[in-house]
């Protein structure tokens, strides 16, 4: 399936590709990542395949990521206007300046102006709050973002790496004040990171936020490259990210992914990406390709359609254990339904209920 089978992002009219090109690795300023030339080849191939959704941040590779995108597509209006360019604020690029980052009005407006300059564009299609700033009232953040939307500098708003209760507070407040609200939710989500299913995913489904998972391969742990046999051969630039995840649980999961990959004549990475894409609420999954070959392999995930049995196999291996109050939910039908079947769910009535012939006090 090509990348031009677009989906709308959450409860918005913004059309995006089912796989989003993540640009966190554009630039070698941190000692690893893609060269400018390789980054340009990756962008060109992604667009050639029909992709239209590129995600970066003011903070990535010391802001070089944004400049690479601006130099290659931003300065060409006809090309730029056919893309959905997303970037983020919150990251502080200026050591010693407390207002250089975070989510206060001063920081947001400055970050937006600088991102527009580096991206060489008049507007940002999707502007993400990168992570929650506990020192700034959410009403200040949302009011500043509304000003940017009204000024035409931002089209849509998204939120990343923030607690579900804070996002719900922000969106409900924005709704009642007539402000723009978050339409996208960027969260870490993979077969090895499913804790988001306790609060964040249900919140996104209820409020209509389109989920864009990041690190769907858990920093490469689910790429198929790492096995029991070669676990001791981690390279320096990636080892720090994935070393703690290379354990028996991960190896058992990779074994299962290999079996399913053979059933589809595909690869471990593609199957892991296909699982993420199949999850409720997921609009577009972020793929981070440092080499053109990685992009080509990852895009192949769109042709992998997992069966219910295969999804069940993977779910059994990785199903998370939720804490309170979700841990109590299995007994709630007994309390609520009075021994009847509701939406196909039956459970005997709670012992706290009255029996026939009795009257409640």
Image (cartoon, rainbow, N blue to C red):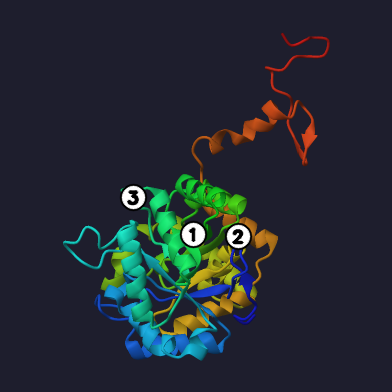
Badge 3: residue crowd in 10 Å (few <14, some 14–19, many ≥20): few
* Circle 2/circle 3 CB separation < 8 Å: no
**Residue nearer the viewer, 171 or 322:** 171
- Relative vertical location of residue 353 with respect to residue 37 in this rendering, above or below: above
Q: Estimate the spatial distance between the alpha carbons at disc 1 and disc 3, rounded to whole Å.
A: 26 Å
SS for callout 2: loop
Q: Estimate the spatial distance between the alpha carbons at disc 2 and disc 3, rounded to whole Å.
A: 33 Å
Q: Residue at x 52, y 53 (%)?
A: 318
- For disc 1, the marked residue is 189
- Relative vertical location of residue 221 with respect to residue 31 in this rendering, above or below: above
Report the quarter where the N terminus lies.
Answer: bottom right
- For disc 2, the marked residue is 279
Q: Is residue 35 left or right of residue 122?
A: left
Residue 232 shows in the view: yes
Report the quarter where the C terminus lies.
Answer: top right
Residue 227 shows in the view: no
Mark 2 or mark 3, whichever is nearer to me: 3
Q: Position of residue 122 (x, y in %)?
A: 43, 79
Q: Looking at the image, which residue sits at the far left?
A: 96
Q: Residue at x 37, y 88 (%)?
A: 71
Number of marks in picture: 3
Q: Estimate the spatial distance between the alpha carbons at disc 1 and disc 2, rounded to whole Å.
A: 10 Å
SS for callout 1: loop
Mark 2 or 3, nearer chain start: 3
Q: Position of residue 336 (x, y in %)?
A: 70, 29
Rendered image quadrant of residue 343:
top right
Q: Position of residue 146 (x, y in %)?
A: 46, 60
Q: Is residue 253 left or right of residue 358?
A: left
Q: Position of residue 44 (x, y in %)?
A: 47, 89
- For disc 3, the marked residue is 136
* Circle 1/circle 2 CB separation < 8 Å: yes
Mark 1 or 2, nearer chain start: 1
């Amino acid at each position: 399936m090509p990348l031009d089978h677009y989906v709308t992002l959450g409860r918005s009219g913004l059309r995006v590709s089912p796989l989003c090109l993540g640009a966190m690795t554009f630039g070698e300023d941190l000692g690893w990542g893609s060269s400018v030339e390789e980054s340009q080849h990756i962008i060109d191939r992604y667009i050639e395949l029909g992709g239209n959704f590129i995600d970066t941040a003011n903070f990535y590779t010391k802001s070089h990521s944004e400049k690479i995108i601006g130099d290659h597509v931003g300065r060409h209006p006809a090309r730029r206007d056919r893309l959905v360019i997303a970037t983020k604020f919150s990251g502080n690029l200026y050591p010693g300046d407390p207002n250089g980052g975070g989510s206060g009005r001063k920081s947001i407006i400055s970050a937006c102006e600088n991102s527009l300059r580096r991206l060489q564009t008049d507007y940002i299609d999707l502007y993400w709050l990168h992570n929650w700033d506990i020192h700034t009232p959410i009403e200040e953040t949302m009011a500043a973002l509304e000003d940017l939307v009204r000024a035409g500098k931002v089209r849509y708003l998204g939120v990343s790496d923030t607690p579900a209760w804070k996002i719900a507070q922000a969106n409900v407040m924005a709704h009642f004040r007539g402000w723009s609200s978050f339409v996208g939710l960027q969260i870490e989500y993979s077969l090895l990171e499913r804790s988001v299913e306790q609060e964040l995913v249900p919140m996104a489904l209820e409020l209509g936020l389109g989920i864009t998972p990041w690190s769907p391969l858990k920093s490469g742990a689910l790429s198929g490259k790492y096995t029991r046999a070669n676990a001791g051969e981690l390279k320096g630039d990636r080892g720090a990210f994935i070393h703690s995840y290379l354990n028996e649980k991960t190896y058992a999961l990779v074994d299962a992914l290999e079996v399913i990959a053979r059933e589809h004549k595909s690869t471990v990475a593609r199957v892991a990406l296909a699982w993420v894409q199949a999850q409720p609420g997921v609009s577009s999954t972020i793929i981070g390709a440092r080499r053109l070959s990685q992009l080509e392999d990852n895009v192949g995930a769109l042709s992998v359609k997992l069966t219910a049995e295969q999804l069940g196999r993977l779910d059994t291996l990785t199903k998370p254990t939720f804490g309170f109050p979700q841990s109590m939910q299995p007994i709630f039908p007994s309390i609520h339904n009075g021994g009847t079947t509701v939406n196909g769910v039956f459970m005997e009535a709670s012992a706290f209920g009255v029996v026939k012939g009795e009257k409640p006090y």
